[in-house]
Structure formats: structure tokens, C-alpha cells
């Protein structure tokens, strides 16, 4: 995490000094931002410029500007991540290189743009903005720094339009995954989203599901809570339900080669959810005869997890046991740069991890999953 | 298997209301007339469809009628074999699902009177939970005041999915009333279906709803903790019923991490979430969402870092285990005693009290 503190310890620097040269890492969750409100205009048809200026985006929540729960810091981002040339945190490639990619030796960085067309009620506008964001990712980021890879963002509520966007980008090596958010109008296993999975599987791309998004549903099954912390913690409950929906609707039965990544939603809940699914499935399998295997088997074959925000038990053996249950080959290191709850690479894993597991955790798993040598 | 010990407390059993018409004797003329004239149907919640496998163990399912509707069956199948001293009845009849607070209130009062007369009066081991019309805090408090005179009621029962998150300040008079009367607050799996049953909308399947119960408990715990319920009511015990508990350690690791980062948003939270859970929150034992091997389970208990959190339950007549295996394998005798006897008694203060009904 990166929060405002008065006396900042110098510890981070000394830890780095001790470990010497930084080993290469992947960062599977980087958030690029736009420097200005009109930065996407060159990639958007003229009609949408006027539309945005008149009506704006109208997402599945009531605010014209900003999120319904105020973040803990401006743009939910590090206070030290404003680029010197101006603009919000994460909007400058050169500053991202200087502050994050170079000093942390990030050799593979996956871009997950969040302010896109996803979660917008006008689905034509959603598709137009998503396609523009995909062009913008190439031109502003991946074409200028080969360490960075883009995510195909799609109009999540319009299956056919989303599938068309994926097919348009298929084969373009700038893109390494399709990106969805966890909160949508319906749970992501529902059939309105199936064309997305079909197209992703055909394109040989994994589908990343990042926490957040808006679909009009309260973030608890008992309505809207009061606080930002409830929304933040609640994303992991949303993600659990999304994963249960994907498994129980038979998405992995229909798409046996599809891989999915749970991004920024924690992974600590994975074993308990899998056990609960299996136990309940023992009783209720007659309701879902399209499932041919135990729910936990689909999860262990099809799902990867990014690490940030890393679960932080008091005792390190608890963390290691947890990862043993999930598999050291299933975790993808991520920092969430430039967001405030950023995980610092040198501090995330406590001592006591084998070299092989450490390498897999920081880089090997991501290279293998994304097919990047 | 781990053998149960005599003298325990079964903290979660579900006596079933045979039909809405069973409550007619406990309703006044107006409501009796409403039920019959309007042809109101039986209030069975989708959370527990009568014929769903999870709603009753095959060998506990009666030849006819709803599972859990016979006291004789409950004695034979749960109270006697597990040799309990007390068994806490948590009726799951769908009285909270109606949208009118007046109707909910009338049905809750009838349900509580029905439980006292048709169950608690007929077996001295039985204790009850006061079901409240949560959508009206005023009426809920009045019902707690009315029913609390009967000392056999040991807790107030709410559903884990309702109209609003349970930490919201509007509900606090309910918690104050419970604390005043020495009642625990029990929060049981199930929804009144006034909101979608998951935080990402309506799923397709019953199995999805059931799996999602655990996530609903997680969001409610966050709400109760960060709204400050336990800063206001430090002695109040809340019991998560049929919640599962193996999700608790990783949930707390996440909550704790964010609380450290943004505690300035909720400065009244005066203790770490971990500490609040250890002092104020308890969990019924069943269902045990874990593999059957004692090794994994004991690692999970170690992750919970407390042997005081779990309360014995059979979840009768729901199907959570086979035979007499209500206790998972590999529990030490000391932990069995904590779960079956010590922890329930430390949670439910009223179990110690005499049961003579006060003159009201």
C-alpha cells in the first residue's frame, strides 16, 4: 500500500540494497490513464465527441463525475505518482518508466485500462469507447515500450459487439488478454456473455476479470453499504460469485481451453470457495447436469490469480499454506501501479520461498500464461 | 469420526411451520381474514425449497410433510443421538419475505408464539430465537421486548440477506434491545429476496444462491465491523448461523489490510477487525466447507487463531453430514468440549438462567 504517512521509514531502500540487482519481474496489473479528457477523441467518431460533451458516459450508477464511493486518495492513486508534466497518475509513459518499470526491472507489464466503455448504459457508446481505448493502448503505450502489453477491452453488456472487437484484434501481438470487470448487469457466467468467451477461446487469449465495474447491482446482497472500505473488501465477494457463476453455468465445460485470470480481487478465498462449491455440488449436482467434473477441478485447470492486494496473514506459514492449496504455478505477480494500494515488489513475499517458486511467482507463470518468452 | 460428548448445545436446528394455515391460531381476526380471504400461499423461501436435497438429509426426510415439522422426529434424529442439553430452534419460515411491514410483523409475532407453544413447551431441552420483522426497526424492537419475557428465547434471529447491510445505524436499536435483554443476535443464511441474492445480480441456480450465502456473511461482517456496532455494544455477541467458517481467515486478512490503509474513513472502529471478531462474533459449526482430511482442517483451525469461535450445530434437518458425523474428523477432545459446551454457554448467557416466564 502507498498511503499518507508522516514519518516515512527508510526501510524500503535498505531492503533493496541488501538484495542487490533487481531480478526481472512481470507486473500483471498496471493501470494506464489518459492525460486529458479528450485524449481518446482521435480514435472516436465525431458523433461521439458531441455526445460525450452533451450527455457524458452515463454508467450503471448515478454520478455524472467520479465514483459513487469517494476513493481514499485522488484517483485512488499514489500521491507520489503525478507525472512532472501534469495529468493524473499513470498518464505518462516516461514517468511510469522512470518511477516503476525501470527501477523495479519490470520486463512484462500488462495494461488494464479501467476507465473505458465498460459499464456504460448506452451500448453503442460503450463499444465505440472500448475500441478507441484499444487503439490508444497501442499508440500511446505498447508501440513505444515493448515491455508493455495491452488488454482488449470490450462492450461487456453487448456480447456480439464484444466478440466482434475481439475478432478484430485477434492475432495482434500487442494484446495478451481480453479484459472484463467483475461487476456487470448479470453474473458473468450468464449466457449474454458467452460470445465473449467463444471469441476469446478462438483467438487463443485468456480472459482477465478485474475487480470493479458497475452493473447496477448493489455491492452486497443486502443493498448498498456506507463506506469505501466496504466496496473495496466487497470486490472479493463479487469475484467469488462471478467465479461460481462461470463454473456453474458450464463455461469451462463449453470452452475446455479457455483460461481466466482473477485480477485484483485477492486469492485467499479461492480454497474455501472451491471446497464450498464441491460440497454443495455433492448435494445439488442434479440441478446442473451439464457439469461433468467437480467445480474445484474446473477452477484448478482454468483459473490464475494476480497477487495484489496480497493477503497479509500475521504468520508467514499461513500464507505459504494458502499458496500451497492454490498452487505456486497459478499466481501472477502484480503491483496495481499507480494505485494507492500498490504492492511493493521487494516486500511482498516473505523469506522462506524456494528459488523455483519465487521465480514462478514473479515472472515464470506470467510468461507461460501469456506466451511471452 | 469424532464422537460428540453429552451435555452439548446444538446451536442451529430448524423446526418447520407445516403451512401458513398453521399460524392461523396465533393471528388476530384481521390477519386470519387476510390470509384466508386473499388466498395467501405458504411462505416457503427459495433459499430452502422443500424438496431440495440440501433442505433435508435423505434419512431425515419424513414420508410426508415438510422436513423438520415433527418434534418426535427431531428428538429421535437430533436431540437424542447427539445427547444435547440444549437445542436452539431457528425457524426459517419465509415471514421476512413479505413487503408490508405490518404483515411481516403479524406473521413474526405468530411465528414466535407458535414456536413457544408447539415446540418449546413440549421439550425442555429446546430454546428459541425471536424472529423479527427487520424492515421495521420499531416493530422489531417491540417484538423483542414482547418475546424476551420468555427466557427460553436466547437470541434474536435475522437473515443474512435483507433490505440493507446490517451494520447500518438504523438497525442499532435492535442491537440495543438484544443487549438489554441478554440476547445474542443470530444471523442465519437466507434472503428476503428484496435485493438480488448475490452482489453481482441474479444467478440461474439454487446451488448458486446457496454457495453465495458465504459471501453475504462476509459483506455483513464488514458492515457490522466498520459501522462501529461493536464499539457501541462491546458485549454484544453475534452468531453467524449456517455461514460456513473456512472463509474467515482470508476474509480477515483482506479486511485487516484495507482497514490499516483507510481506517481514517471509519475512525470509530477502535480495535482491529481480527480482535473484534475474536471477542464478538461466533460461527455455527455446520456446514464445514473443507476437505475431509484432519490435516487440512487442523491447519484451517490454526489459521483461525482461536478455539472460541465455533459453536456446535447439526443444522437439522439440512443435509450437511452423514450418520452421526456432526463433528469433523480430527478434533482434539479439548476442542470438542469448547465447541459443544464452553463456547455456546459463553455466547448464550440466557442458557444459564431459569426458564420461568416472567409475569408480563
Image: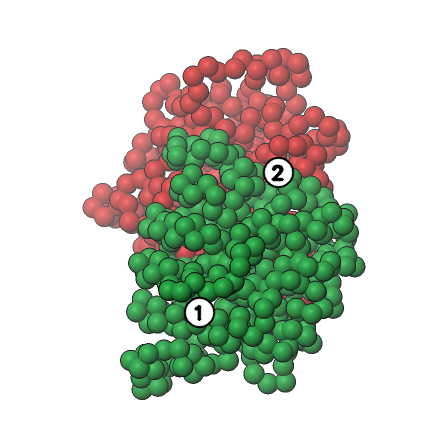
Chain colours: A red, B green
Secondary structure, mark 1, is helix
Q: Which residue is disc 2 drawn over?
A: A332
Q: Position of residue B165 (x, y in %)?
A: 40, 52
**Quadrant housing the C terminus of chain B:** bottom left
Mark 2 chain: A
Query: In this orientation, does residue B252 appear?
Result: no
Vertical side of B163 occupied by B31: above or below: below
Label annotation for residue B112:
1
Taking the spot 30% from the left edge, 35% from the top edge, the residue there is A37
Q: Nearer the viewer, residue B320 or A13?
A: B320
In the picture provided, is B294 more to the left or to the right than A155?
right
Q: In which quarter of the image is residue B292?
A: bottom right
Taking the spot 58% from the left edge, 48% from the top edge, the residue there is B346
In the picture provided, is A370 more to the left or to the right than A141?
right
Secondary structure, mark 2, is strand
Taking the spot 70% from the left edge, 65% from the top edge, the residue there is B82
Vertical side of A198 occupied by B57: above or below: below
Outermost residue on the left side: it is A54
Marks 1/2: CA distance?
52 Å
Q: Position of residue B218 (x, y in %)?
A: 51, 49
Taking the spot 37% from the left edge, 18% from the top edge, the residue there is A84
Q: Where is residue B25 in the image (x, y as percent from the top left)?
A: 40, 81
Mark 2 is surrounded, within 10 Å at the Cα level, by few (under 14), some (14 to 19) or many (20 or more) other residues, namely: many
Amino acid at each position: 500500500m502507498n498511503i499518507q504517512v508522516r514519518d516515512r521509514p527508510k526501510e524500503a531502500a535498505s531492503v533493496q540494497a541488501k538484495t542487490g540487482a533487481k531480478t526481472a519481474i512481470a507486473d500483471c496489473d498496471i493501470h494506464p490513464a489518459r492525460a486529458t479528457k479528450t485524449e481518446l477523441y482521435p480514435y472516436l467518431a465525431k458523433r461521439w465527441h458531441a455526445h460525450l460533451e452533451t450527455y457524458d458516459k452515463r454508467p450503471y450508477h448515478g454520478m455524472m463525475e467520479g465514483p459513487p464511493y469517494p476513493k481514499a486518495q485522488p484517483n485512488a492513486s499514489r500521491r507520489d505518482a503525478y507525472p512532472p508534466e501534469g495529468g493524473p497518475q499513470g498518464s505518462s509513459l516516461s514517468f511510469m518508466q522512470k518511477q516503476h518499470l525501470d527501477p523495479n526491472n519490470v520486463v512484462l507489464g500488462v495494461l488494464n485500462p479501467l476507465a473505458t466503455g465498460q459499464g456504460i448504459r448506452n451500448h453503442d457508446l460503450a463499444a465505440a469507447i472500448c475500441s478507441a481505448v484499444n487503439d490508444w493502448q497501442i499508440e500511446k503505450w505498447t508501440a513505444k515500450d515493448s515491455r508493455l502489453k495491452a488488454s482488449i477491452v470490450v462492450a461487456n453488456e453487448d456480447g456480439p459487439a464484444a466478440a466482434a472487437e475481439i475478432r478484430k484484434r485477434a492475432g495482434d501481438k500487442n494484446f495478451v488478454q481480453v479484459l472484463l470487470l467483475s461487476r456487470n448487469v448479470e453474473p458473468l457466467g450468464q449466457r449474454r456473455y458467452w460470445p465473449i468467451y467463444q471469441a476469446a477461446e478462438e483467438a487463443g487469449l485468456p480472459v482477465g476479470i478485474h475487480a470493479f465495474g458497475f452493473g447496477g447491482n448493489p455491492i452486497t446482497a443486502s443493498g448498498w453499504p456506507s463506506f469505501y472500505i466496504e466496496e473495496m473488501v466487497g470486490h472479493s465477494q463479487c469475484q467469488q460469485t462471478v467465479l461460481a457463476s462461470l463454473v456453474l453455468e458450464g463455461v469451462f465445460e463449453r470452452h475446455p481451453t479457455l483460461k481466466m485470470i482473477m485480477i485484483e480481487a485477492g486469492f485467499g478465498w479461492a480454497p474455501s470457495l472451491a471446497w464450498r462449491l464441491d460440497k454443495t455440488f455433492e448435494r445439488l449436482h442434479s440441478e446442473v447436469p451439464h457439469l461433468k467434473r467437480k467445480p474445484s477441478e474446473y477452477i484448478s485447470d482454468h483459473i490464475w490469480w494476480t497477487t495484489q492486494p496480497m493477503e497479509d496473514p500475521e504468520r508467514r506459514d499461513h500464507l505459504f499454506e494458502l499458496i500451497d492449496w492454490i498452487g505456486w504455478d497459478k499466481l501472477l505477480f502484480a503491483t496495481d501501479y499507480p494505485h494507492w494500494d500498490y504492492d511493493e515488489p521487494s516486500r511482498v513475499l516473505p523469506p522462506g520461498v524456494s528459488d523455483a517458486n519465487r521465480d514462478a511467482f514473479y515472472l515464470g507463470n506470467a510468461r507461460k500464461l501469456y506466451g511471452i518468452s | 469420526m469424532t464422537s460428540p460428548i453429552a451435555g452439548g448445545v446444538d446451536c442451529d436446528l430448524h423446526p418447520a411451520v407445516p403451512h401458513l394455515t398453521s399460524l392461523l391460531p396465533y393471528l388476530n381476526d384481521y390477519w386470519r381474514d387476510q390470509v384466508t380471504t386473499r388466498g395467501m400461499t405458504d411462505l416457503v423461501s427459495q433459499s430452502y425449497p422443500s424438496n431440495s436435497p440440501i433442505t433435508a438429509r435423505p434419512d431425515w426426510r419424513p414420508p410426508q410433510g415438510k422436513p423438520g415439522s415433527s418434534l418426535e422426529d427431531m428428538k429421535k434424529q437430533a436431540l437424542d443421538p447427539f445427547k444435547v442439553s440444549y437445542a436452539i430452534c431457528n425457524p426459517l419460515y419465509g415471514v421476512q419475505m413479505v413487503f408490508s411491514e405490518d404483515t411481516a410483523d403479524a406473521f413474526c409475532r405468530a411465528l414466535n408464539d407458535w414456536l413457544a407453544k408447539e415446540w418449546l413447551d413440549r421439550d425442555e431441552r429446546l430454546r428459541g430465537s425471536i424472529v423479527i420483522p427487520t424492515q421495521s426497526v420499531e416493530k422489531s424492537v417491540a417484538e423483542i421486548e414482547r418475546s424476551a419475557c420468555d427466557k427460553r428465547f436466547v437470541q434474536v434471529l435475522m437473515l443474512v440477506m435483507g433490505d440493507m447491510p446490517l451494520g447500518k445505524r438504523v438497525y442499532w436499536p435492535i442491537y440495543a434491545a438484544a443487549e438489554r435483554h441478554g440476547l445474542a443476535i443470530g444471523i442465519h443464511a437466507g434472503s428476503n429476496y428484496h435485493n438480488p441474492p448475490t452482489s453481482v445480480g441474479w444467478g440461474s441456480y439454487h446451488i448458486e444462491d446457496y454457495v453465495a450465502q458465504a459471501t453475504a456473511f462476509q459483506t455483513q461482517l464488514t458492515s457490522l465491523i466498520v459501522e462501529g456496532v461493536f464499539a457501541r455494544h462491546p458485549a454484544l455477541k453475534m452468531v453467524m448461523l449456517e455461514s460456513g467458517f473456512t472463509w474467515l481467515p482470508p476474509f480477515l486478512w483482506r479486511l485487516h489490510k484495507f482497514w490499516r490503509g483507510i481506517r481514517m474513513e471509519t475512525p470509530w472502529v477502535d480495535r482491529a477487525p481480527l480482535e473484534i471478531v475474536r471477542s464478538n462474533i461466533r460461527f455455527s459449526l455446520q456446514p464445514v466447507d473443507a476437505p475431509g482430511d484432519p490435516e487440512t482442517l487442523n491447519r484451517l483451525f490454526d489459521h483461525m487463531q482461536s478455539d472460541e469461535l465455533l459453536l456446535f450445530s447439526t443444522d437439522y434437518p439440512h443435509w450437511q453430514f452423514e450418520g452421526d458425523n456432526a463433528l469433523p474428523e480430527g478434533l482434539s477432545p479439548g476442542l470438542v468440549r469448547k465447541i459443544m459446551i464452553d463456547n455456546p454457554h459463553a455466547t448464550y448467557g440466557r442458557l444459564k438462567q431459569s426458564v420461568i416466564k416472567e409475569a408480563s
